[in-house]
Amino acid sequence: MTGDPRSDLFFLPAWPPSADAVLWVSLTLVIAALLGEFVYRWLRLPRVVGYAAVGTIVSALDIGLTGPGLKPGLRSIVDLALALLLFELGSRINLRWLRTNPWLLATSLAEALLTFIAVHLALSALGTDPRTATAIAAIAIGTSPAVVMRVAAEFDASGQVTERMIVLTGLNTFYAVLASKFVFGWLHAEYVGSLVRAFAHPLYLLAGSAIVAGLLAFTVSLIARRLDLRNENSTLLLLGMILLALSITKMANLSTLLVPLLAGVMLRNSTERPWIWPRHFGTAGGALVLMLFVITGSVWSVDTLVAGAALGAVAIVARAAAKLVATTLLAAPSGISMRQGLALGITLAPMSGAAIVMMTELQNLYPEFASHLTAAVFSAIAFLELVGPIAVHLALRWVNEENIR
Amino acid sequence: MPLEAFAESRALTLGLELELQIVNTHDFDLTHGAQDLLRLVGKRKLPGEVKPEMTGSMIELSTGVCRDYAEARSHLAELRDVLVTCANKLNIGLSGGGTHPFQDWSQRRIYDTPRFHMLSELYGYLSKQFTIFGQHVHIGCAGPDAALVLLHGLSRFIPHFIALSASSPFVQGIDTGFHSARLNSVFAFPLSGRAPFTLTWEEFSRYFDKMARTGVVQSMKDFYWDIRPKPEFGTIEVRVLDTPLTIEKAAALAAYIQCVARWLSFEQPFRPVEDDYLVYTFNRFQACRFGFDGTFVDPQTGEHRTIREDIAETLAEIEQHAIELGAEDACRRVRDDIGALGNDATWIRQTYERENLLPEVVRQQCLRWSR
């Protein structure tokens, strides 16, 4: 009655209304999902293009939520979503195939090497300093595992090009992470003058990641013996374990890209018995992947685009040409037709989440050096974010490997 | 198109055609690898042929004309080794079996040739459901009339061939209870069943002309009978077997058919009459459903016994012929199967009971095939 100093209408909300994170996240989810469906139904393109477009639009509007680089909170989502996709990718890599078809391994090494050389040469020709060119070339080796896995899943792709696309992506992501760590190690050596540091970091990374990956793989295989992995509850368990492994990875300063990839590969190749995974970890995974593409679609700004467009374009062209040449020349010896070889080269075009993570790690280690790279790399990623999934989809459709039309 | 003339062939020679499953090595579901596989195989020299079939997840290998069991085995082994090498290069697997245990027939793609597209148009969903895998055995005949007599003689033994080769208990993930569920798909086709009871080629030609005149049939290929004359090769073709899980069994069953054919041609233990066909569909169903435990009704005496017992009696009768043809090992295999081992359908069921995962069963089928 008396003594309450608040106005009579104290229960009404404040004006103007204050939005919190939940509002933005939910809005993003809704709009991205809608745009994804629109793109799929009306334009017959992969849904991820719609998700990435939302991110791109948010950046273009310069709302101030995003910028060239990953904020730490968003990094966790990206890491987890990428981990799920990398784990699935790894579990589709049959190492024995590389032995029965050595030309496939040759194709992988050739495309990675050619990409590195081509991008390095092209950027150097444009006057980029060698350290920057090397760092960009190392990151450019990798194809986006996220785009490749999602587009293949959306259109239920199957066939020789799909299989090889997955294997080559897994391998070149592995090479790219290692190469970029070696480059950083070299930078260590240059800046600090210590050769030990040049090799110690990459070696620690490789060995440590392999151990954590091994632990994850071992634990999953133990669980798989008791539980049926196909039901929803087991999916959550699997998700939880991958998240756990990821947090250990971060605590130990290891590679969040290598651990899930290696874990998937180890699981697959540890036993002949087929693994039947739940499709993309169910609904939780689907939401994470959507967020991943929205976030990666938005890690650029108009300024960086203007600054780095030219170099980015050159890098994209050199990279695409190198991959195409490698896959087409080695198509016949590795047992596919010329057309399939061309399509395979095109499917290796995307660059997205994994490259962003590699860049972010560089930014954390050497912010000053990284700023030389930022413009070019993020412009390239901004472009390929939208064009990459379309390229994969068209290439797979060209060779008739999509089962959903 | 009139019925072609019956070509000349050496009596009692053998030829085998096997339809194989092409599977991926992740979850061992069917995959459309035929075109890629044929591209690689086309570069090799082979004692026979490799051809595409109705859907892109099937591939057919055929031996040349073989004299006996040993030659059939050697042709098959060479073909198998080449196919397995090429399949390994493409990270795909090859397997026997009359049906794929869990494929979804609506996912299949028709192989891109005019004939297959025409069949797909004509038969609708049946052509995709026809993703079943069978073994066809050709037996050379002395002449067209002898061919027809042999055809009707062999019809009595169809339940043997079905029970021995049965390897399709699972369809779309479910145990159908049949030993050979594959034949249920064959019987859905309008021109399936058995050849009309004619014992001379002239009578048969008249029947063929009548069918051709009605426009229902263009060539012999349009008949999906259990045993069919193949005038082009000068043979009769037994089409009722499921693809076995190993080439050894495939060769052994072909040799068994060869021995029975020799017995029928040389000794003529029964004279085929139309009334023999009264029990035909019953015996055939019993074989598909129950395998060796099915009931066999003797067409001559009306006596009931199990298919197992009838095979055992037949093995005794053809013993001498087996020796002459060099097929004793083949007959010993058949005897082992009706004894303790059971047929491939039994093996598939036992493996599933142990592993409880159908993709794992298919993986083990691929292993058995490739060894």
Image (cartoon, coloured by chain):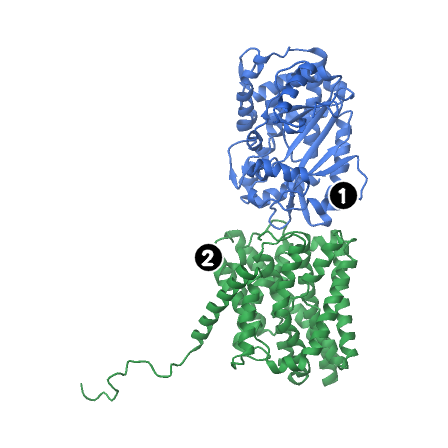
Chain colours: A green, B blue
Q: Is residue B6 above or below residue A255?
A: above
Res A10 visible: yes
Amino acid type at image mark 2? Asn
**Subunit under mark 1:** B
> Mark 1 and mark 2, same subunit?
no
Q: Residues within 10 Å of mark 2 (few under 14, many from 20)?
A: few
Q: Residues within 10 Å of mark 1 (few under 14, many from 20)?
A: many
Q: Is residue A373 above or below residue B142?
A: below
- Find numbered disc 2 in the image and state the secondary structure of the residue it sits on: helix
Amino acid type at image mark 1? Val
At a point 64% along the width and 61% down the height, the residue shown is: A392
Q: Quadrant of residue B99?
A: top right
**Subunit under mark 2:** A
At a point 75% along the width and 64% down the height, the residue shown is: A111
Q: Which numbered tag is attached to residue B41?
A: 1
Pick the residue in front: B165 or B371: B165
Q: Where does label 2 land, which residue?
A: A233
Instruction: Determine contact: label 1, label 2, CB under 8 Å.
Output: no
